[in-house]
Amino acid sequence: MRSFDTMSQAYEALVDKRQEIADLASASALLSWDQEVLMPAGASARRARQLGTLASLQHKMTVEELPRLLGAAEAEVANSEATQTQRLNVQRIREDLTKQQKLPAAFVADMAETSSRAQRVWEGARAQNDFASFQPWLEKIVALKQQEAQYYGYIDHPYDALLDSYEPGVRTAKVQQLFDAMKPRLKALLDAVMAAPQVDDSFLMQPIGQDLQMAFSASVLRQMGYSFEHGRQDLSAHPFCTSFGMEDVRITTRYRPNDIGFLLYSSIHEGGHALYEQGLKSEAYGMPEGEACSLSIHESMSRMWENNIARSEAFWNYFYPSFSAIYPDGLKGQSAERVFAAVNKVAPSLIRIEADELSYHFHIFIRFEIEQALVAGTLAVRDLPAYWNAQYKNYLGVTVPNDAHGVLQDVHWSLGAMGYFATYSLGSFYAAQFLEEARKQLPNLDEKLAVGEFHHLREWLQGQIYDRGRLHTSDELCTIITGRELDPEPFVRYISAKLAKVYGVHLVV
Ligand code: CO
């Protein structure tokens, strides 16, 4: 009889290869971080080449070496001595590979080349407010995405194939049903809020220096449990979180002198992503067990800290004194309650990334409908700006003055990322459902948050979410944690209760 060590040889060889691939991905991520944060402008062409070399090495290992090692590991874990975790790791890697192998190499190269050029055209088009120059490129992208859906295959809707790349196992019809059910309820709440007297947030718009803003946001990040021993925070044009393994997870934020919330909340959002990445199992580096579950679950972690926690009364009760210390003039005559109200101000606007927590979802509903129609061929790219503007009027009551503030605002489509947007709203809904469960299991959570004891929640997330890696789909994970699949009712309860406090509107939605 063979020993267990001999029997896990193939599995260990698979782990080694996956870790080598993860090392290359980490090196690419570090070069990309540098490109956004520190790199001198003159280095961009060389950097692009270096990133291309690393990507092709990674691709080469994945297509030439991984399949044989995976096949051997599959044969091995079929043996009863393998653990359930080993089996699930192998299963996830097989699913990834099967999906990857459906796309011909020529198609992948065409997509990469087209989207890289389309992104440059989009940057110019947005700066010049010139949709016409982007239109032929978006038409090419849409045609490629239609082709991609054919390669992947689907049962009901071609959009299913694209959604699956970002949110495995989730069908278009299910998300559409969820969004359709939410629209009238969130619209009723939005209308009620807009009919109430508006809250004043002007006192948050006085200048505070960059160093003070960065120091205050760092103190919040530390309280959340973000480790500066294993990360750092810098400034960049677009905030992001990136990981080079669990031991080095970095975030960026952005600065506006007259708007503390701008830096603070993007920092907390990325900090929520970073806690997840720092919390992944170090010993599972390179394997699905050491990866985040999905985009929507990732977004649930960032949004939970950004909105449910850092826009709560408990949070501001705790941080008000230290905020006053760096911002004494702005807070003269104010109170924790007024800061709580100000950071929860609702005001429909044109730009998704600056939207409030309630009207945000309409930005997503609109994009979700548009993407389906583009992929299905029922909406032509040339008709897109007019359709976009009509939907903004319809859902948010705002008039789009030009395409730069309308259809050209997001980078996603130029990158070929279609099927992504829904994960943002799903993330908010998951966050509320997880937090309801956390409150059941952690009595007096809000009293603890109000005295700065954030570790109870972080440790709960560690056990429930971070430790489980990518061994389950989002729905499976949600069922393991809360006993049921995604349910939007906790979000509706949470947002209506909060806005009832802020605006005094009482509404059963
Ligand atoms: Co995010």
Image: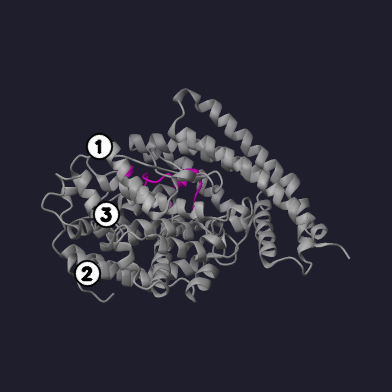
> Going by the image, does 155 lie left or right of 242?
right
Please identify the quadrant where the N terminus is shown.
Answer: bottom right
Q: Which mark is residue 209?
A: 1
Residue lying furthest right: 1
Q: Which residue matches tag 3? A: 319
**At which x and y percent is residue 199?**
16, 58
* N-term mark: 2 or 1: 1
Q: Residue at x 70, y 41 (%)?
A: 60
**At which x and y percent is residue 431?**
41, 64
* N-term mark: 3 or 2: 3
- Mark 3–mark 1 distance (CA, rounded to whole Å): 18 Å
Query: Are there few (<14), some (14-19), or many (20+) residues within 10 Å of tag 2?
Result: some
Q: Nearer the viewer, mark 3 or mark 1?
A: 3
- Mark 2–mark 1 distance (CA, rounded to whole Å): 34 Å
Q: Residue at x 20, y 58 (%)?
A: 336
Q: Nearer the viewer, mark 3 or mark 2?
A: 3
Question: In this view of the protein, can residue 31 be seen by the observer?
Answer: yes
Does the magenta segment cover residue 415?
yes
Q: Tell me the quarter of the picture where residue 71 sits.
A: bottom right
Q: Nearer the viewer, mark 2 or mark 1?
A: 1
Residue range corresponding to the magenta coloring: 403-418
| Front-lying residue, 263 or 223 | 223
Q: Amino acid at mark 1?
A: Gly
Q: How is the image coloured?
A: one colour
Please identify the quadrant where the C terminus is shown.
Answer: bottom left
Q: Tell me the quarter of the picture where residue 20 sits.
A: top right
Q: Is mark 2 within 8 Å of ligand 1?
A: no
Q: Which mark is residue 500?
A: 2
- Mark 3–mark 2 distance (CA, rounded to whole Å): 23 Å
